[in-house]
Amino acid sequence: MGPAGDAARPRRFFGVYLLYCLNPRHRGRVYVGFTVNPARRVQQHNGGRKKGGAWRTSGRGPWEMVLIVHGFPSAVAALRFEWAWQHPHASRRLAHVGPRVRSEAAFPFHLRVLAHMLRAPPWARLPLTVRWLRADFRRELCPPPPPHMPLAFGPPPPRAPAPRSRSGTSADAESEPDQGTEACCALCALSFQDEEGPLCCPHPGCRLRAHVICLAEEFLQEEPGQLLPLEGQCPGCKNSLLWGDLIWLCRMGAEEEEEDLESEEVRRGFDPSLPTPPHTRGCL
């Protein structure tokens, strides 16, 4: 579905995880969080606030990261998913999910919410992966994830370095425009603005460069009732492309800034969609 060697290519990692408390005094508590580095993040949680962990997990360890959902096209997308998973009662997209009942433990409740989230827009159309980090904690999700979302086991794939440029999606020099010529969209023939980068086909030898809106409209010709493409055929080389892969490959940003978003202090003021005060975050 993707270019050759896609399975082995490391990507930028944005994950939303589920922690489970193994401390006998607090056993059964869970915590939902965002990370770009799962191994480091669980160490921070178990190290307490002085090591960068969250205050709701500090002093209650050990914590085990048992599940992580990854494949988000950006940190913002992952943070919004995290917030909705933490606060399903406050998310209008999850109004159909029943509240937690008294006989329901926190762990199965969070899995029930997750199952419905993966079937709800806009998350149902993202190229997400549901990964069990602890096989002994695995439960069947009901309803099951959409067919395009794989179920995986074990540690996540290697992390990728930050992209060097918005258009640098291939090492093939043929895919770069001639120096001194103005880059234009292959679909509308208009030039790219300085503040926006084009989407570029990652297949070797393909020179497709297009506006995000133009390529989205091209992909959505096969799905006119949708707002967000899932996949489509490259107008240049005719290969099949996942929309999430294209967004990943064109992203530009400093990895240090993304890692800072793991901090509760930074994230509380990061986005209007994350308005939760610290005493309501994550842990039940």
Image (cartoon, grey):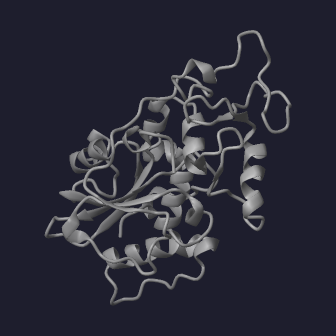
Q: Residue at x 33, y 58 (%)?
A: 56
Residue 108 coordinates in the image, percent (x, y): 34, 78
Residue 9 to residue 267: above or below: above
Q: Quadrant of residue 262?
A: top left
Marks counted in the figure total 0
The quadrant of the image that shows the C terminus is bottom left
Q: Is residue 26 visible?
A: no
Residue 135 coordinates in the image, percent (x, y): 21, 66
User: Foreground residue, 167 or 111?
Assistant: 167
Residue 215 to residue 222: above or below: above
Residue 2 coordinates in the image, percent (x, y): 51, 46
Q: Residue at x 22, y 58 (%)?
A: 63
Q: Quadrant of residue 5?
A: top left
Q: Residue at x 48, y 37 (%)?
A: 258
User: Foreground residue, 207 or 277?
Assistant: 207
- Horizontal side of 153 relative to 259 (left or right) equals left
User: Foreground residue, 148 or 40?
Assistant: 148
User: Foreground residue, 25 or 17?
Assistant: 17
Q: Is residue 49 visible?
A: yes
- Horizontal side of 126 relative to 264 (left or right) equals right
Residue 195 coordinates in the image, percent (x, y): 74, 28
- Horizontal side of 120 relative to 25 (left or right) equals right
- Horizontal side of 148 relative to 32 (left or right) equals right
Q: Residue at x 42, y 78 (%)?
A: 112
